[in-house]
Amino acid sequence: MKQSEKIIIPTDKYMLHENDAWERSLDFLLMENAYLKTRLSEAVDAVVDKTLLDEAEQYHTFFLKNDETFKNILSQVKMQKMLLNKMKLSTNDLNDLNFTKNQSAIRLEMENTEEEFQQLKRQFNHFIANA
């Protein structure tokens, strides 16, 4: 392929694939978060140090907040997919400013959420390893 040639993917298909990928990622994050809560519960059963219990409680709070965040973003993604499907059926332009702004906002929120979750997982794994 020549450098000047470009692969052109229709905007609606790209956005639909992007939203599908976000849904899968959020489903995985919810499962991973549940797994971390289970690991935390098992660790707390073995801990007698008050300081470690306080830190464990903080992690539990983080995990509960993650559940809310993931579900909130998942709701936004599903709404965005619904709007995308409605726009495909109507004469509305997919380049609608509000729609593209929402898509960009969700994209940024997903990037930040995934990065923050990975950092939390690393910190939690360090906590468990040293508890």
Image (spheres, grey):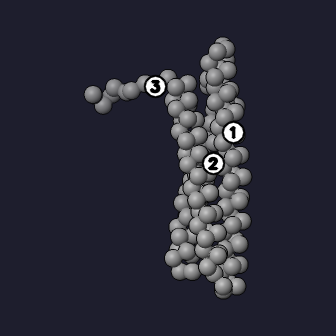
Inspect this view and state whether residue 126 appears.
Answer: yes
Q: Name the residue rendered at 66%, 20% in the picture.
A: 87
Residue matched to label 1: 76
Quadrant of res 52: bottom right
Residue matched to label 3: 9
Which is more N-terminal, label 2 or label 3?
Answer: 3
Q: Which mark is residue 125?
A: none
The residue furthest bottom is 49
User: Left of 64 or right of it: where is 119?
Assistant: left
Which is more N-terminal, label 3 or label 1?
Answer: 3
Which is more N-terminal, label 1 or label 2?
Answer: 1
Tell me which amino acid carries mark 2: Glu
The Cα atoms of the two marked residues, 3 and 2, are separated by: 24 Å
Disc nearest the viewer among 2 and 1? 1
Q: Are marks 2 and 1 in contact (CB under 8 Å)?
A: yes
The Cα atoms of the two marked residues, 1 and 3, are separated by: 23 Å
Figure quadrant of the C terminus: bottom right
Mark 3 secondary-structure assignment: loop
Tell me which amino acid carries mark 1: Gln
Q: Nearer the viewer, residue 30 or 1?
A: 30
